[in-house]
């Protein structure tokens, strides 16, 4: 290697090495700071494009999860209301059995009749209060006896439906049963009307249970699918922070050594001055 004051070869070599180390240090620092080995297109354009597509799918699945959660909630509220209504049928039948007692005074009969009307009123309350997120599957007066929910990112839907609802039945069949009995003592007719309504409620309960089960199963599947997708995305773009931290420390040491080597190389031309003393 010639001794020259015009070209410091040693310094050029040290500078080139330092540039390379600085570039690697920048990349490693970015991985440690962001937690990603592919944080943007400059890291790896192909992998970043794939990752962005996966992120878009995850966002779409989040909307699906929200829709299915709403369906699950509405199904639970509707099922609870139907169960409450079903539980009142025994009490209502008991009131009619009491009314069948021929030894009752008119005052006692009025009390039992009013009790029966209160039970019908409670059933009506259950129907009107079975609302979740503004939707009520039992109150056909609102026209909301069928609601659909998004089941997957392709737009497939699942449905919760109670057919014609209950509010009209509650105010007609049951009220008619009480009126018929109290006016004419038609116990068998009253019980028949109650049984008709009870059959409607039981049929709705079974249907809602089946529909809610489908929504719950689909929600569980989508939750698992999102978890698996996130794991795949992590394997694609996440950095091994522990490994990157070790690499960062190593590069910092190498950077300091190259700075010292560059400093030594820069001092080398000064030694030529001793030739002229």
Image (cartoon, rainbow, N blue to C red):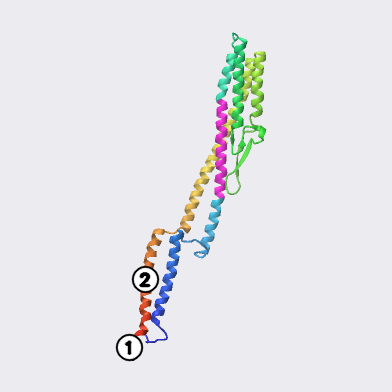
Using the image, tell me which numbered label, if any, was put on residue 161: none
Question: Which residue is at a point 43% across and 73% down the rendered structure image?
Answer: 19
Question: Would you say residue 200 is visible in this rendering?
Answer: no
Q: Nearer the viewer, residue 104 or 203?
A: 104
Question: Would you say residue 11 is visible in this rendering?
Answer: yes
| Left or right: 3 in relation to 196 | left
- Could you tell me how far apart the alpha carbons at marks 1 and 2 are, in whole angstroms? 29 Å
- Which residue lies under the disc numbered 1? 274
Q: Quadrant of the N terminus?
A: bottom left
Q: Which residues are magenta?
A: 60-86
Residue 182, given in percent of the width and then of the height, sits at: 65, 15
Q: Is residue 63 magenta?
A: yes
- Which residue lies under the disc numbered 2? 256
Looking at the image, the residue that sits furthest to the front is 277
Residue 275, given in percent of the width and then of the height, sits at: 33, 90
Q: Is residue 176 magenta?
A: no
> Is residue 22 shown above or below 182?
below
Prevailing SS of the magenta stretch:
helix
Q: In which image quadrant can residue 123 be found?
A: top right
| Left or right: 9 in relation to 142 | left
Residue 223, given in percent of the width and then of the height, sits at: 51, 46
Q: Nearer the viewer, residue 247 or 209?
A: 247
The local secondary structure at tag 1 comes to helix
């Amino acid at each position: 290697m010639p001794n020259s004051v015009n070209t410091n070869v040693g310094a050029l070599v040290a500078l080139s090495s330092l540039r390379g180390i600085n570039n690697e240090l920048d990349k490693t620092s970015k991985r440690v700071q962001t937690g990603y080995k592919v944080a943007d297109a400059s890291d790896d354009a192909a992998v970043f494009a794939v990752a962005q597509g996966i992120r878009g799918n995850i966002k779409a699945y989040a909307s699906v999860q929200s829709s299915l959660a709403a369906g699950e909630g509405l199904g639970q509220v509707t099922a609870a209301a139907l169960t409450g209504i079903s539980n009142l049928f025994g009490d209502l039948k008991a009131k009619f059995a009491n009314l069948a007692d021929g030894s009752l005074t008119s005052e006692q009969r009025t009390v039992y009749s009013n009790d029966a009307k209160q039970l019908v009123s409670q059933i009506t309350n259950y129907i009107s209060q079975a609302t979740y997120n503004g939707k009520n599957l039992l109150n056909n007066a609102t026209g909301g006896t069928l609601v659909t929910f998004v089941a997957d990112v392709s737009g497939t839907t699942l449905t919760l439906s109670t057919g014609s609802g209950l509010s009209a039945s509650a105010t007609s069949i049951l009220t008619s049963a009480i009126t018929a009995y109290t006016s004419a003592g038609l116990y068998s007719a009253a019980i028949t009307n109650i049984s008709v309504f009870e059959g409607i409620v039981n049929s709705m309960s079974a249907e809602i249970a089946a529909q809610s089960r489908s929504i719950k199963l689909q929600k569980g599947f989508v939750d698992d699918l999102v978890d698996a997708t996130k794991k795949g995305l992590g394997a694609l773009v996440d950095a091994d922070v522990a490994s990157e931290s070790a690499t960062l420390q190593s590069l910092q040491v190498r950077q300091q050594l190259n700075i010292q080597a560059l400093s030594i190389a820069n001092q080398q031309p000064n030694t030529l001055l001793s030739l002229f003393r």
